[in-house]
Image: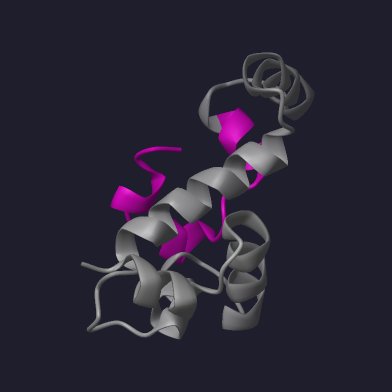
Amino acid sequence: MNAYYQTDKPQTTGLPSVAYCASELNLSANYFGDLIKKETRHTAQEYIQSKVIEAAKEQIFDQSKSVSQIAYKLSFEYPQHFMRLFKQRVGQSPNDYRRFHSN
């Protein structure tokens, strides 16, 4: 997951799924989910979403990119889905986060 957004996979594969992550590790999706749950106390989907949000936070301060451009780069089909997930996970919209946390 950490290297996923440093490759071209987001553009070719889309948002990483539980099945995709499991297959990258040669594990079944159920076993992968069990391992993630045991280690993090979160579901595999929640873990993947947290990694997506981490990647978004790294990119959000690039003022040359709009929030929509960042959403598309992270493989969201619709920027609204990215904005909703970001707000659910962070407690602020991407624009508010950018505004209140930039140096």
Magenta: main secondary structure: helix
Which residue lies at the image location 56% right of the left edge and 45% below the top edge?
Answer: 50
In the shown orientation, is residue 89 left or right of residue 103?
right
In the shown orientation, is residue 12 left or right of residue 23?
left
Give whichever of 39, 87 is nearer the camera: 87
Give whichever of 58, 24 is nearer the camera: 58
The percent coordinates of residue 14 (x first, y second) are: 54, 61
The percent coordinates of residue 29 (x first, y second) are: 73, 29
How many dots with numbers? Answer: 0
In this view, the residue farthest toward the right is 30
Is residue 38 depicted above or below 84 in this figure? above
Residue 59, quarter of picture: bottom left
Magenta region = 1-23
Quadrant of the frame with the C terminus: bottom left
Q: Look at the image and say whether residue 11 sits in the magenta stretch.
A: yes
The percent coordinates of residue 27 (x first, y second) are: 64, 20
Q: Look at the image and say whether residue 60 sits in the magenta stretch.
A: no
Give whichever of 23, 1 is nearer the camera: 1
* Colour setup of the view: one colour
Is residue 33 depicted above or below 19 in this figure? above
Which residue lies at the image location 69% right of the left edge and 34% below the top edge?
Answer: 44
Which residue lies at the image location 63% right of the left edge and 22% below the top edge?
Answer: 40
The percent coordinates of residue 76 (x first, y second) are: 56, 70
Is residue 68 depicted above or below 51 in this figure? below
Is residue 28 depicted above or below 97 in this figure? above
Which residue lies at the image location 59% right of the left edge and 43% below the top edge?
Answer: 48
